[in-house]
Image (spheres, rainbow, N blue to C red):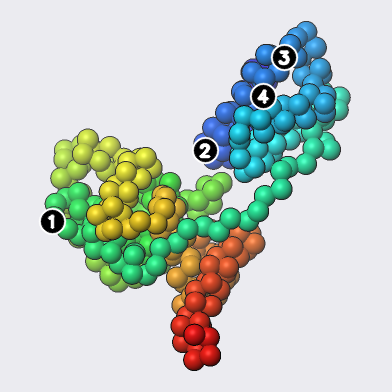
Amino acid sequence: MREDVDGFLHFMAVERGVSPNTVSAYRTDLYQLVDYLADNGVGGSSGWSEVDDRIVADYLLKLHELGYSETTRARKVASAKSFFGFLLEEGVIAGDPTENLSSPRLGRSLPDALSVEEVAGLLESATLGGTPESRRDHAMLELLYATGMRVSELVSLNLDDVALDQGGVRCFGKGSKERVIPIHERCVGVLRSYLDTARADFVGKRRNAAVFLNRKGQRLTRQGFWLILKGHAKRAGITARITPHTLRHSFATHLLVGGAPLRHVQELLGHASITTTQVYTHLSNEHVRAEYDKAHPRAR
């Protein structure tokens, strides 16, 4: 049955052009479903035709008993729905056992964002030392906060994606969708300093088009960036929960607080739908409320 899953993954990657991260998530979810079916004696000679809505419901109940969060279970439901829809279109099954299946209800969780002061402290932390690493780290953090790009987009940047004279960078988001993001003069200066001096210490005599490299002269990974970020957050005394997306969230929130139109923030973030961007309006409204309570004489 895993062969059918692999066929679906190939279809999603090649025909639909979904990202490697999404394919990896599908693989994890669907292999887990296959293992559950095998453990329960389902999927013998009849294959996927043996799977009905009762079996799928039992599987979801098992996920709940195992303590998976609603968000994770919702993702696994979405994976199953996509897969069985594929099998139906391919004629492998006559009916979709997930047709009437609903996802767990999710509360909208607000993304974490740092304050302007915390971001300043984080960026200041990266300037300390005067080493090639500190110049690289400072350039990465300044660029993330200046553009709001995803960490995966940051580490995927190549030299020809950076146009410092024009004050912008080109990145490729989900579905390989290209967008060009402007960067302010301070960020241009920090990035130029890194590229003109420190990057050579990483690349040496090797040939590598990546903008951000590790000590081996290889493209920096998302995991590598996360370790760097956590280190600087600790040195800056930031106690709030921090993730690789923290600067992206902070970028969007601070722009909206500063009066940027929601549509402009949507374009900068590369969101396909404005409803995705609207979650940040809750954060900016909270900021406005806090400032109101501090400023209004009758609110204290």
Q: CA distance from mark 2 to mark 1?
A: 35 Å
Q: Earlier in the sequence, mark 3 or mark 4?
A: 4
Dot 4 corresponds to which residue? 33
Q: CA distance from mark 1 to mark 4?
A: 51 Å
SS at mark 3?
Answer: loop
As drawn, the residue found furthest toward the right would be 94
Callout 2: few (<14), some (14-19), or many (20+) C-alpha neighbours within 10 Å?
Answer: few
Q: CA distance from mark 1 to mark 3?
A: 60 Å
User: Mark 3 and 2 residues: CB-CB less than 8 Å, in contact?
Assistant: no
Dot 3 corresponds to which residue? 40
Tell which tag, 1 or 3, sits nearer the viewer. Answer: 3
Residue at screen point 60% across, 65% down: 278
Q: Earlier in the sequence, mark 1 or mark 3?
A: 3
Residue at screen point 28% across, 70% down: 186
Q: Amino acid at mark 2?
A: Asn
Dot 1 corresponds to which residue? 130
As drawn, the residue found furthest toward the left would be 130
Up-down: is 106 above or below 256?
above
Residue 28 coordinates in the image, percent (x, y): 57, 28
Q: Which mark is residue 21?
A: 2
